[in-house]
């Protein structure tokens, strides 16, 4: 399946907040999020809310997590974000309930149009539906939806939408089997 580059139109791209707010977020992020110091999840979630994130209940946010734009982040109840996760959200990232994003995973909402001489920015929203598990060191690319209870295994790269109750592996990630929950 080829990606239709015309579906990523960013002619009017905006970071969504003023330069001052973005600088303030960078400082807060470096001090409280991107550090190995184990600040309590509740404290970090409060900071995310202050910067515009939509936050559910019972969320675990481990140390050394990088979030580009908290105002473009929605976290559902009972979700877990592991160490060294990078949410590079130039577009909306929606993480629904009971989602696990394991260590070192990356949610990548931006890319560049290699067919353009100006190498234009392209962005696409990411949605992780209920019960999704993103394995350690894996990557979810721009514009991807990981459907309910799908799994992206360790080190895999999602370049297309993941079907519900399915397990994906590889680069690019391919469906290897169905997920059975007992």
Image (tube, helix red, strand yellow):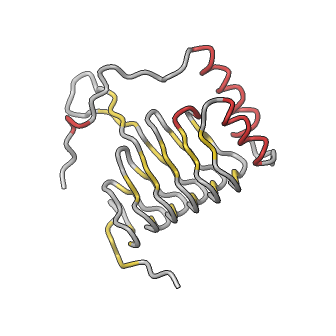
- Which residue is rendered at x = 40% and y = 36% of the image? 110
Classify residue 128 as left or right of residue 98: left
Classify residue 3 as left or right of residue 159: left
Q: Quadrant of residue 143?
A: top left
Q: Is residue 95 above or below residue 69?
A: below
- Which residue is rendered at x = 60% and y = 21% of the image? 22
Q: Position of residue 29 (x, y in %)?
A: 68, 33
Q: How many marks?
A: 0
Q: Quadrant of residue 86?
A: top right
- Which residue is rendered at x = 43% and y = 64% of the image? 148
Q: Is residue 29 above or below residue 159?
A: above
Position of the N terminus by quadrant: bottom left
Q: Position of residue 20 (x, y in %)?
A: 62, 14
- Which residue is rendered at x = 43% and y = 78% of the image? 179
Q: Position of residue 139 (x, y in %)?
A: 45, 53
Of 90 and 92, nearer the camera is: 92
Classify residue 103 as left or right of residue 147: right
- Seen from this angle, which residue lies furthest bottom? 182
Classify residue 11 as left or right of residue 158: left
């Amino acid at each position: 399946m080829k990606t239709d580059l015309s579906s990523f139109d960013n002619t009017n791209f905006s970071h969504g907040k003023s330069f001052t707010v973005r600088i303030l977020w960078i400082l807060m992020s470096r001090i409280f999020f991107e550090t190995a110091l184990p600040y309590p999840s509740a404290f970090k979630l409060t900071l995310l809310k202050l910067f515009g994130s939509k936050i559910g209940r019972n969320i675990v946010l481990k140390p050394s997590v990088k979030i580009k734009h908290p105002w473009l982040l929605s976290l559902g109840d009972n979700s877990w974000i592991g160490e060294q996760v990078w949410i590079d959200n130039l577009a909306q990232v929606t993480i629904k309930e009971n989602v696990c994003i394991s260590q070192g995973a990356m949610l990548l909402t931006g890319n560049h149009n290699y067919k353009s001489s100006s190498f234009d920015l392209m962005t696409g929203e990411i949605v992780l539906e209920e019960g999704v598990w993103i394995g350690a060191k894996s990557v979810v690319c721009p514009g991807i939806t990981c459907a309910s209870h799908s799994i992206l295994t360790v080190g895999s790269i999602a370049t297309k939408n993941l079907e519900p109750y399915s397990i994906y592996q590889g680069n690019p990630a391919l469906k290897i089997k169905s997920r059975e929950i007992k």
